Image (cartoon, grey):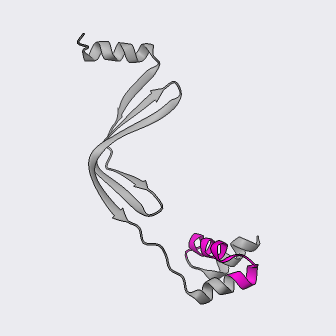
Amino acid sequence: MKMDNRNTRRMMERMGIDMKEIPDVQEVVIKTADKEMHITNASVSEVNAQGNRIFQVAGEVEEVQVEKKKFKDEDVLLVQQQTGASKERALAALEQSDGEVARAILKLTS
């Protein structure tokens, strides 16, 4: 049984599924802990199925490795000494405060 676009749309409506194209998308970026996926010339469709929003993305994909920020050992030690935090928490605070020691200390003490 062959289905045309009209029948497909009707069936989707009966199932409570609404699909629409998102116009003028320039780029989609997906970020993970160690890489980013840049999808250019993207075609994005949004499917709303019974309250759940699902996005379908197609385009040219370029993967980019993300460099971890490195901090001086003295900065990490200073944050640890001033706050009593573990090395992992001190590194996380420095990362969140873009390497600024004073902001990292305030973040951990307030």
Q: Is residue 74 above or below residue 93?
A: below
Q: Position of residue 24 (x, y in %)?
A: 31, 43
Q: Which residues are magenta?
A: 80-98
Q: Which of the 4 image quarters holds residue 96?
A: bottom right
* Residue 90 shown in magenta: yes
Q: Residue at 27% of width from left, 18% of height from top?
A: 5
* Residue 51 shown in magenta: no
Q: Is residue 11 visible?
A: yes
Q: Position of residue 100 (x, y in %)?
A: 59, 80
Quadrant occupied by the C terminus:
bottom right
Q: Is residue 89 above or below residue 50?
A: below
Q: Residue at 69% of width from left, 76% of height from top?
A: 86
Q: Position of residue 81 (x, y in %)?
A: 73, 85
Q: Which of the 4 image quarters holds residue 32?
A: bottom left
Chief SS of the magenta region? helix
Q: Which of the 4 image quarters holds residue 7?
A: top left
Please state if 42 lies on the left or on the right of 79 as rendered.
left
Q: Residue at 45% of width from left, 16% of height from top?
A: 15
Q: Position of residue 30 (x, y in %)?
A: 41, 53
